[in-house]
Amino acid sequence: METWTYAQARAVKDTRPGRAVLTFRSAGPAGRGKLPLAGIGRFRYGVPLSKYLPRMASNMRLVLLGAPGSGKGTQAQRLRDQKGIPQVSSGDLLRDAVARGTDLGKRAKAAMDAGELVTDDIVLGLIRERLGRPDAAAGFILDGYPRNVAQAGALDALLSELGQPIDTVVLMNVDEKALVMRLTGRRTCPACGKVFNVYSSPSQKGDKCDNPEHGAEAPVLKQRDDDKEDVIANRLKVYNDQTAPLIEHYTARGVLKVVNADQPVDRVYADFVKVAV
Ligand code: AP5
């Protein structure tokens, strides 16, 4: 977690509970920007800002939009690790259901193997259950949901029920030519979910996960079944046909921010934090 000191806080505007806005400058990937200090009570001068970070993350409700391989999962995991906001990935929820052999997983598998979208009702059920868990009450990063205009409508209805409207939708924008190499090179840890790339960000331990939490028993990295070239081609087509229209949808709502995701991961993250936080 990035730690900020009081000296790096340039101004706290209006210190009343629930109103405070911190203007910060940080040497780390967060860069500079503004953070709402909602939910922390009165801001106390002289207290290290790192003490407030988990609560500062509150009320951040983000949607990540972007083509397969654009880096949604990579950036969501980083923001989760740095700010303590849960990542809610519809793809991960579906893969977990498939791996556990649940009824829902069995119904979803064929569509996933073909690179098609799983039916809206199945995915909405998973998202509803996940957003209902206590850790999501203070904010979340939705990664991979919604995926079409009907899902965007269902999400609005669900979030209005929960009293948690979307703050920002971030589009990870990448030239399609870069995506096939990213996807064929992706490897994922089956235990902790860490994402690698054999070309751009390989594991320090070769074909095993280098997350220190595994100790000597590091799991062997896996390639996703749908990261094969013929399935990738269909996933990109499905994105262009069904998901890309959401760009216009959220632009019209005035909540869309675009990040150039065709840069090294650290630079994408710095730009992402600037628009999302
Ligand atoms: P899902 O798991 O959501 O897949 P996706 O949207 O196709 O996105 P990916 O996970 O492939 O890519 P990503 O953008 O997260 O990229 P990542 O960070 O991993 O969905 C899978 C399937 O589930 C769907 O096809 C569908 O069947 C079903 N599904 C899911 N949600 C659904 C929904 N809402 N409705 C219906 N069906 C649904 O990065 C990729 C690789 O690139 C990695 O190796 C990474 O290390 C590398 N990389 C990342 N950033 C960079 C960078 N800046 N430079 C170089 N390499 C990079």
Image: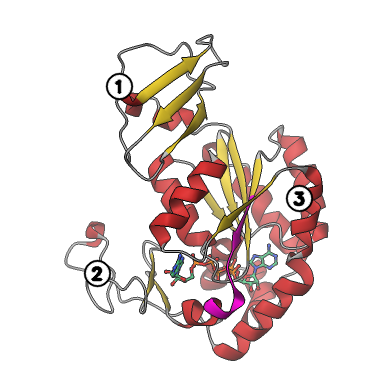
Task: Identify the residue shown where x is 76% and y is 50%.
Answer: 250
- Residue 177 part of the magenta-drawn span: yes
Say which amino acid is labelled 3. Tyr
Q: Which residue is mark 2?
A: 218
Q: Name the front one of labels 2 and 1.
A: 1
Spot occupied by residue 105 in the image (x, y as percentages of width and height): 62, 70
Tell me which image quadrant ligand 1 sits in.
bottom right
- Residue 32 part of the magenta-drawn span: no
Q: Is residue 213 left or right of residue 98?
A: left
Q: Which residue is mark 1?
A: 7
**170 versus 56 height, above or below:** below
In this view, the residue farthest toward the bottom is: 230
| SS class, disc 3 | helix
Distance of mark 3 from mark 2, alpha carbons?
41 Å
Say which amino acid is labelled 1. Ala
What number of labels is visible? Answer: 3
Answer few, some or many: residues within 10 Å of disc 3's Cα (few below 14, many 20 plus, some between 14 and 19).
some
**244 versus 160 height, above or below:** below
Q: Is residue 194 left or right of residue 136?
A: left
Residue 192's mark?
none
Can residue 154 be seen?
Answer: no
Residue 250's mark?
3
Magenta stretch bounds: 170-178
Q: Quadrant of the N terminus?
A: top left
Label 3, ligand 1: CB separation under 8 Å? no
Q: Earlier in the sequence, mark 3 or mark 1?
A: 1
Say which amino acid is labelled 2. Ala
| SS class, disc 1 | helix
Spot occupied by residue 215 in the image (x, y as percentages of width and height): 19, 62
Distance of mark 2 from mark 1, alpha carbons?
40 Å
Viewer-nearest residue: 5 or 214: 5
